[in-house]
Amino acid sequence: MKFAENNNQAAEYLRQAIPLMVKHNIPPNPLNYALWYTYVSDRLPELNVQLDKTLTTYGTCPTMLSEQLFREHMIKDEINGAEDIQASLISLINNLYEDAGHTAEKTANFSTVLEESLVTLQQQEDGEVSLPLDSIIHALSTHTKSIGDTARLFQERMHAAQIEIQALKEELNKTRQDARVDPLTNLFNRRVFDSELAQLVSNTNHNLISSFILVDIDHFKNFNDTYGHLMGDKVLQYVGKLLKDVCPEPMLPVRYGGEEFAVLMPGVDIDSASEIAEKVREKIQAIRIKQKKSGEIISSITASFGVSQFKSGETAEQLIDRTDKALYKAKDSGRNQVKCAN
């Protein structure tokens, strides 16, 4: 999940989260910070309910429950279908923790032997004890070799873990990318759009200029009924490629849903956005698809557009609603045209 708060709000949430963690003896690790930051922000009510129940039952939040709540509420959407990756990462971290503990124990034992040997040497020098020097040297040598072997083994384990973590990161990135991309058009999907729009509207820079376009292919259901879904998919793929070509980064074209597309345009005013929409409209109108079986040329593809510019203080829902109204105005006016929102 994404966090779209400004710096002041984020700092306030952090100031609220830390005392709660201290009060309930919650370990101060990044996973728990994320959980309790989300808790005080009240963005996931179901997570709050589960955490409250956990505190009532245990007086704290046990590590295993923290991991479970983190997977179920914080990263469920981002890495949907990547349960094995999550489990591998958690297992790897736990193994490294055990290895580090074992190494620390060996180091502590060596420190004890070294201290005892120094005391014995001092006592022998003072004439208090008479212990063969070679016995002391042998003990030190044995423990030195032991800690050396343990440290070398831990270093090898760390190196292997780095390789494994890199492989898991690459696999996770691929999984996350798959979850964010519409497989038919290769555009980002509605989930990405919602996240990016939320971040845009939360920006406190009131001078920020951004525009938004909604695109709807006209009479698409009739097109599918007449020519079949395979032909409809070709149209969607073409429109997706067209939007990607005409709207390069930092503009963000996405498949909004069904036959609808959307484009977020940071730094673009409504006049420029309208010009881009008109350019796309003309290119869609120029689409010609030849049916293999009949040889018929299909040239009846058009689209309607709603264009708006973000207003300071406007919510994501208000921006979408204004743009949607402009889109329906284009449809009601005969389709295959661009209309700007008030």
Image (tube, rainbow, N blue to C red):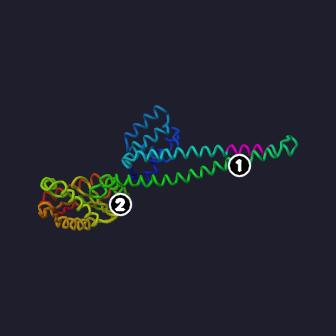
**Residue 202's x, y, as percent?**
36, 55
| Image: magenta residue range | 108-119
181 displayed left or right of 289:
right
**Numbered disc 1: secondary structure:** helix
Q: Position of residue 338 (x, y in %)?
A: 19, 63
Q: Is residue 64 visible?
A: yes
Quarter location, residue 53: top left
The single residue placed furthest to the front in the displayed view is: 293
- The residue where tag 2 is placed is 206
Quadrant of the rendered structure where residue 269 is?
Answer: bottom left
> Which SS type dominates the magenta stretch?
helix
At x 37% / y 57%, what residue is drawn?
A: 203
Left or right: 216 in relation to 195: left
> Residue 310: image x %, image y %?
29, 59
* Position of residue 51 in the picture relative to residue 29 (left or right): left
Disc ID at residue 144: 1
CA gap, disc 2 and disc 1: 64 Å
Q: Which amino acid does label 2 sit on?
A: His
Q: Which residue is drawn at 81% across and 46% down?
A: 134
**Is 213 contained in the magenta span?**
no
